[in-house]
Image (cartoon, rainbow, N blue to C red):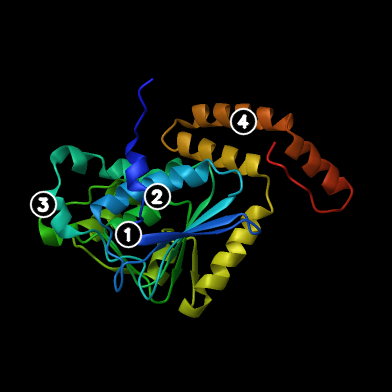
Amino acid sequence: MTQLVHPAQSLLSEFDGFYVEFSEADSRADIVLDRPPFNVVSMKQRDQLRIVLEALDDDARVRVIVLRGAGEHFSSGGDIKGFLEASPERVSKLAWNVAAPARCSKPVIAANRGYCFGVGFELSLACDFRIATDTTLYALPEQKLGQIPGSGGSARLQKMVGIGRTKDIVMRSRRIPGAQAYDWGIATEFVGDAELESATDAMVRELLAFSPLAQRTAKKLLNDTEDAPLSIAIELEGHCYSRLRSSHDFREGVEAFHQKRKPLFKGE
């Protein structure tokens, strides 16, 4: 039989502009953007980030994933020159790569400090939770280049804050400070810059205390019903609830509640 070859074999031989930290004891994996000083994201890096997220999603040792940047900035955006060199077909796949955090069945946290522009903002919007600090600036500055966001940024943002505020951000290339992003519901939490790591750690611990099965179910249900009519969303919620009733984790949760102890969830 002919040996099968997959693009991931070469793409994962050496990470371009990021690295991965894994703590089996904490059931946590960190994807750290690391191309100083602004952690610009290359075209190859987008492909690699998608594949790494898919691999971590398939790794039973990982319960929570954190996406963060090394240094003072999360990311100032993508490699602008790369857009001119890429083929139309390659560019058309950008949104699929950036949507990897949303497709991941596990909780994904974006820890945002400093610049969070362009694809850096779009990656963060695709995560489940965003923690901003008093140094964070969010922006989709593509209008300054004669372009628009191309990896889901304006679409995701409109779902979060409405068309008026999205036009204000996209059409004016406005920079939104962390405090304002929190007020608008873009950021899940807002902390002092020195507290970002401890706030991220606390959120990871909080998420780890829940049933992995219930977490996966909740994320998929909420993603799948985002655009659904209310009646359909309620119907799907009922089916998911019914399936979880027969799980080990639900029985364990109920028994632990009555026995006044911490539950020991298995994700089954």
Q: Position of residue 214 (x, y in %)?
A: 64, 41
Q: Earlier in the sequence, mark 2 or mark 1?
A: 1
Q: Residue at x 29, y 70 (%)?
A: 38
Q: Nearer the viewer, residue 23 or 100?
A: 23
Q: Tell which circle, 1 or 4, labels the residue nearer the N-terminal end.
A: 1
Q: Which residue is mark 3?
A: 84
Question: Element under label 3?
Answer: helix
Please tell me how crowded label 4 is: few (under 14), some (14-19), or many (20+) other residues with Cα within 10 Å: some
Of the image marks 3 and 4, the number of the one nearer the N terminus:
3
Image quadrant of residue 34? bottom left
Q: How far separated are the C-alphas under marks 1 and 4?
A: 33 Å
Disc 3 + disc 1, Cβ < 8 Å: no
Residue 93 x/y as whole percent: 26, 40
Residue 120's mark? 1
In three-dimensional space, the C-alpha distance between marks 3 and 2, rounded to whole angstroms, equals 25 Å
Circle nearer the N terminus (3, 2):
3
Q: Nearer the viewer, mark 3 or mark 1?
A: 3
